[in-house]
Amino acid sequence: MAQIFKNLKIRYILKSLRVRFFIIVFATGLISCLVMHAVILDSYEDRAVNVRSTEVQTQLKILANHLIAYNYLQDTSSEVINAELDMLANLYDGRVMVINDDLKVVKDTYNISQGKIIISEEVVNCLKTGQRGAVSKFDKNNGYIEMITPIIESQLIQEKDVSDVGDTGVVVRGVLLTSVSTDTIETTLDILGRRATTLEVIIVTVILVFAAWVANILLKPFNRITAAINDVKAGYTDQPVSGPNYYETEQILNAFNALLKRMKVLDDSRQEFVSNVSHELKTPITSMKVIADSLLAQEEVPNELYRDFMNDISHEIDREDKIINDLLVLVKMDKKASGLIVTNVDVVNLTESVLKRLRPIAMQRNIDLTLESKRAVTAEIDEVKISLVIMNLVENAIKYNNDNGWVRVTIDADHQYFYIEVKDSGVGIPEDCFDHIYERFYRVDKSRSREVGGTGLGLSIARSAVIMHRGSIDLKSKPGEGTTFTIKIPLICAGNKKQQ
Ligand SMILES: Nc1ncnc2c1ncn2[C@@H]1O[C@H](COP(=O)(O)OP(=O)(O)OP(=O)(O)O)[C@@H](O)[C@H]1O
Ligand SMILES: [Mg+2]
């Protein structure tokens, strides 16, 4: 149990958008804080070292001039210069060495290296190229700045910037090698670092709280959506889900609401279908019951009346049988998986055989039924289903026609589709019924349809069969003038099919 709980928790942490969001906000805050810390302290150190070196260099340049003026390189007894050197060394907590052009240390404020020869690359370079000015080097590990300042003999040059002047008339007499401690800088840096760390801890805590808060606030709409969808699922409501949301969550809600609407439409149509079916099935039974009751109510009924009533009952049974058969056909078509049984069919022949069966009915009302084929058409179709389509369309054209009218069936094809057009001179269909004409049990004129024995399933069956073939059915009609149904079906069947 504990293990399952633990697994669930880990899964939640790994997959939760809230946790990811929190981590992103927190990490961004933390990283920027740390980068700022490092950059600010680093640049402070650079700046402090630069200021210190420039300051000391200025003093050293002045001192170098004094050294020349007092001829100190030859005679180090000058009290003034010695005092100046000591003062400088004390002031910056450093060491100053005066080196002459023979690389000999003539004065060391630490009094250690006096009289020794210094062979250092920097010193030699400075003696050679001293005109280019002083050099500073910061040794971070040992905490000091080393400065090498040329002692240049030439009044003229010292007044100007040394680097701007050419070689002529410039003599480097010696070098000042100075080390200045950066302890004070390091101490300040330490204090600053400690303060920054304290501040950082506070900022990071604030970011932590902020990230948790933001993650919670920003993802709240998702909780609301889940709750609302759960409400719908539980059946508490079927109202569209709404709420103040972001664009993204609105998209989810819109999609969900559209799905809800579609489900409602499907549910409504299913309910309507069931109630229609019950009603349609009940009608013949009620008629039979009325006929039977009236027979039973009478005594000594004459034989002819019995026959008459029995005829009516048989008629109602036929009607019931037709409705049930049509419904079964429809249900079969709805099951997409059932597929098509496709064969190569001569469409003209097929239509001819359907018309042959319907001709007697047409003749009864003196309706002229003709077939015109513009070319020979062979197509990959389900023979039974397409003959159902033709049968229903032509049957309607006869049923909803006037006596002595006509029905013209035309077959045509192009390289991709074949077309069957069923045109009649009948009563026509009003335009506002076009959208409903394929609905189950829909009849334009209920009483007329009842008269001719229609249940409103024929076109629904025809359309399902056409759609299964990936075709389309089209309707043009004018009340009083006639109707034209055209079906368009691919010559080669693609997709869901069972080849025979
Ligand atoms: N050619 C047509 N001319 C005029 N009205 C038509 C035509 N075809 C169909 N209709 C109208 O459309 C309705 C639906 O037709 P459909 O074929 O689906 O049902 P039905 O003919 O009433 O019954 P069923 O075909 O199931 O026996 C018909 O009731 C009729 O009002
Ligand atoms: Mg019909």
Image (tube, rainbow, N blue to C red):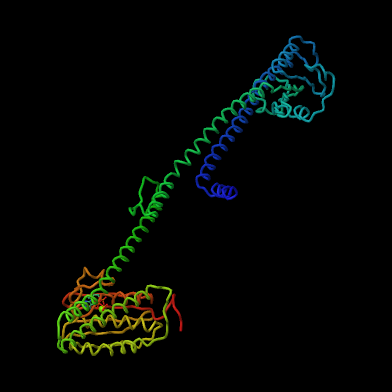
Residue lying at 62% horizontally and 26% vertically, measured from the top left:
194
Q: Nearer the viewer, residue 67 or 1?
A: 1
Q: Quadrant of residue 436?
A: bottom left
Image position of 37 with respect to 258: above or below: above
Image position of 4 with respect to 297: above or below: above
Q: Nearer the viewer, residue 231 or 26?
A: 231
Q: Quadrant of residue 354?
A: bottom left
Residue lying at 20% horizontally and 83% vertically, measured from the top left:
312
Residue lying at 50% horizontally and 47% vertically, measured from the top left:
17
Residue placed furthest toward the front: 299
Q: Is residue 395 visible?
A: yes
In the displayed structure, does residue 396 sit left or right of residue 140? Answer: left
Q: Position of residue 425 (x, y in %)?
A: 19, 81
Image position of 249 with respect to 397: above or below: above
Q: Position of residue 205 (x, y in %)?
A: 54, 33
Q: Nearer the viewer, residue 69 or 198?
A: 198
In the displayed structure, does residue 236 sit left or right of residue 498? Answer: left
Residue placed furthest toward the top: 79
Q: Nearer the viewer, residue 112 or 486?
A: 486
Residue lying at 16% horizontally and 79% vertically, measured from the top left:
297
In the displayed structure, does residue 66 sit left or right of residue 5? Answer: right
